[in-house]
Amino acid sequence: MTNLSLGAKMRENQIKATAAAEDAKRVKAEEEDAKNRKDRAKVVAFFDDAKQEFVADILSGKLSVQLELRSGGKYSDAYRIMEVYRWNDPWARISEDSKHKYHDVWLEFSAWAAENDLVAKWEYAHNFADDAWQVLSVAPRT
């Protein structure tokens, strides 16, 4: 048996348990931070790709430029991360909801559009069946 009293052993156990819980909480917070950074990078990449595609389309003479954001599409990660499936209500869109986690990224994209004499907008689209998505487009500022 040990030289510690039962009370001392119990305190020692409590200290170890508290330290383990704090370590687990710290690890979980670090993992969540890493996931948030990775998700933000994917959202930023979507808008960066949109800029590049819009520039290329406009310079090649296209009159209508747009990008579909849908589940299972090229940008399905951004679709999931930005919770586009909740955007059926226009006020839930990243462009309208100032509390949206990535609203600041939208504001940067919108500012880029304005600097280039464009207006960016989202439109709801669907196929009258079970599929719905959002279309990001730019048009000349009027």
Image: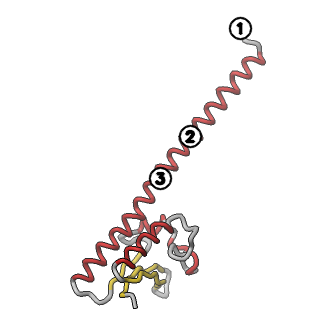
Q: Position of residue 12 (x, y in %)?
A: 69, 21
Q: Is residue 47 visible?
A: yes
Q: What amino acid type should be assigned to the residue bearing mark 2? A: Arg
Q: Are marks 1 and 2 in contact (CB under 8 Å)?
A: no
The residue that mark 1 highlights is: 3
Q: Are marks 3 and 2 in contact (CB under 8 Å)?
A: no
Up-down: is 29 above or below 104?
A: above
Q: Is residue 12 found left or right of 87 in the rendered image?
A: right
Q: What amino acid type should be assigned to the residue bearing mark 1? A: Asn
Q: Nearer the viewer, mark 1 or mark 3?
A: 3
The answer for how far apart the CA atoms under marks 3 and 2 are is: 14 Å
Characterize the local packing of mark 3: few (<14), some (14-19) or many (20 or more) Cα atoms within 10 angstroms: few
The residue that mark 2 highlights is: 26
Up-down: is 43 above or below 16?
A: below
At 26% from the left and 81% from the top, the residue drawn is 57
Q: Is residue 92 found left or right of 38 in the rendered image?
A: right
Q: Nearer the viewer, mark 1 or mark 2?
A: 2
At 43% from the left and 55% from the top, the residue drawn is 38
Residues 132 and 14: in front is 14
The answer for how far apart the CA atoms under marks 1 and 3 are is: 46 Å
At 39% from the left and 79% from the top, the residue drawn is 114
Up-down: is 105 above or below 58?
A: above
Mark 3 or mark 2, earlier in chain: 2
Q: Position of residue 123 (x, y in %)?
A: 46, 84
